[in-house]
Amino acid sequence: MRSKSVLVVEDDENSADLLSTFARSEGFVASIASSLAQARQQLIVHKPGIVLLDLGLPDGSGMDLFSDENLRGDAEIVLITGNASVDTSVQALRLGAADYLIKPVSLKLLRTVLTRLADAPPRGSEPPQLDAGAPEAAGEDAPPVDKAPRAVAMSGRAADNFGGMWGISQAMQDVFTQIERVARTSVSVFIVGESGTGKELVAESIHRFSHRKNGPFEAVNCGAISAQLIESELFGHEKGSFTGAIKQHKGFFERASGGTLFLDEITEMSLDLQVKLLRVLETGTFSRVGSDSPLRSDVRVVAATNRQPLTAVREGKLREDLYYRLNVFQIGLPPLRDRLEDLPLVARHFLAAYARREGRSLSITDAALKAMCSYHWPGNVRELRNYVHRTAIMVDDKAIDLDSLPPFDAQTVVGAGTVAERYPATAAEGTGSRAVAQPATAVPVASEKPAEADRAAGSPASAAHGAAVPLAGTVSEMPVVPVRVGSTIADAERDLIIATLDYCGGAKERTADMLGISLKTLYNRLRAYGSD
């Protein structure tokens, strides 16, 4: 446990007195420094456990204190500023700040920060290690146990996997580093990435490597709960607060107390509820539906979206003030197509996990892996996992080769025919040649509807194994959905979704991509419309 002493570095006398008085009321020993020079002296003499550091000081920036590692010792620094910016917060976290508070400082939030840091292990101690043989987060398969010793990064984690995520690419190594840095703080994190890239795995890794690791981790998909129920699910409700409320219900904020709350697909939340969420994040309090009694929120919020956040703000899907409140630290997940050097590692991991679970002996050839790297993988890692499992089901206990691979989606792979026919050089390499795979000529674009094109090309099997499957037509050739003046937004949205689904011949993934929404959101809308 860290020393219960606080050093307040603040040149404003009133603010310094307020912060030090509050710290003393919480059981801490508090002292004050009004400049960087005084702070350096205090760090040597008193060795505080926590430093509340103002960014703007008479003799320099509070950032300068981060360079005095020997003077800081075991002290955790909490940066306090009235001029907040994303760049400043990211810089502070990279330099080692434990937290980042905005003036005027909420005393409730400050109490949470002081309590958490006082109970935290000393700086420099190793973060909790994830067992490489333990089940992955969010229901993923268990990673394989390698017989050969794996390279280990300086942090102590394996160099090719972290928290259930696998990758040797620089993009994924950067993600692993960001998780390690931000996990030890309590700031809000915004995870941005396409569907299937592993956003929930990132959120759970942040929780498991944080000081809240012994608390609960609650995940809620904001697009999977109806607008009528999501407020009750988040904040809870009192008995009799509405029809069907037969007993008191604790929401996610209460159930996640002392832990982490993951809000997936935050842009699917209604704007009215976004206002209430913003108030909770700023005040640290909320009330159950049907009650006026405030309850204290002690959760770390991690949010995620598969949209570009600023685009969602411009389109009215995400409030700008909520975006800046959530986006203290952003982690961007690369799509699988941008890190194909990771595909062999990830595919072998999924195959080994499947084989271990099913009690089988399976492997995959390098030629098959190279052919898989030619595919676009719009569903990212989730799609790769399903593809590997589907392949494993259809083969005997032997090596998966080119001929064993099921056909890819014809819209997102270059060329036609079987995998071996599309990549003859790759097939040759599987027999010993060093030739590099060269894809066949691209399939020409046709203007028919996908369903009609499929019928024109023959059966799905014949299309996948030789017949060219036309793509969707140009924008000018696509049908138009008329909207009657006075129609509600909900009705217009329903007509557009149903028409697009019909245009795509019932292919839901293609429909979701064309509409710019997640597959989960599309399924939720269709269920609401009474369709399947």
Image (cartoon, rainbow, N blue to C red):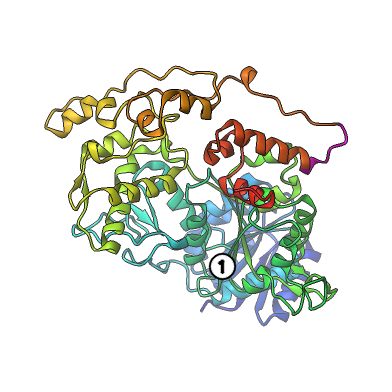
Q: Secondary structure at mark 1?
A: helix
Q: Determine whether 147 is above or below 369 in the image.
A: below
Q: Determine whether 430 is above or below 139 in the image.
A: above
**Residue 69 appears left or right of 498:** left
Magenta residue span: 485-490
Which residue shows up at 48% across the image and 18% down it? 445
Q: Determine whether 511 is above or below 96 in the image.
A: above
Number of marks drawn:
1
Residue 309 or residue 441, whichever sits in front: 441
Q: Is residue 119 magenta?
A: no
Spot occupied by residue 366 in the image (x, y as percentages of width and height): 21, 39
Residue 80 or residue 394, whichever sits in front: 394
Residue 221 or residue 94, whichever sits in front: 221
The residue at the far left in this view is: 432
Spot occupied by residue 285 in the image (x, y as percentages of width and height): 76, 69
Which residue shows up at 59% across the image and 73% down it? 116
The residue at the far bottom in this view is: 27
**Residue 420 appears left or right of 311:** left
Which residue shows up at 55% across the image and 38% down it? 506
Residue underneath mark 1: 43
Q: Is residue 487 magenta?
A: yes
The three-letter code of the residue at mark 1 reads Leu
**Residue 379 appears left or right of 488:** left
**Residue 166 appears left or right of 232:** left
Question: Which corner quadrant of the image does residue 242 belong to?
Answer: bottom right
Which residue shows up at 63% across the image and 56% down it? 224
Crowding near pointer 1: few (<14 within 10 Å), some, many (20+)? some
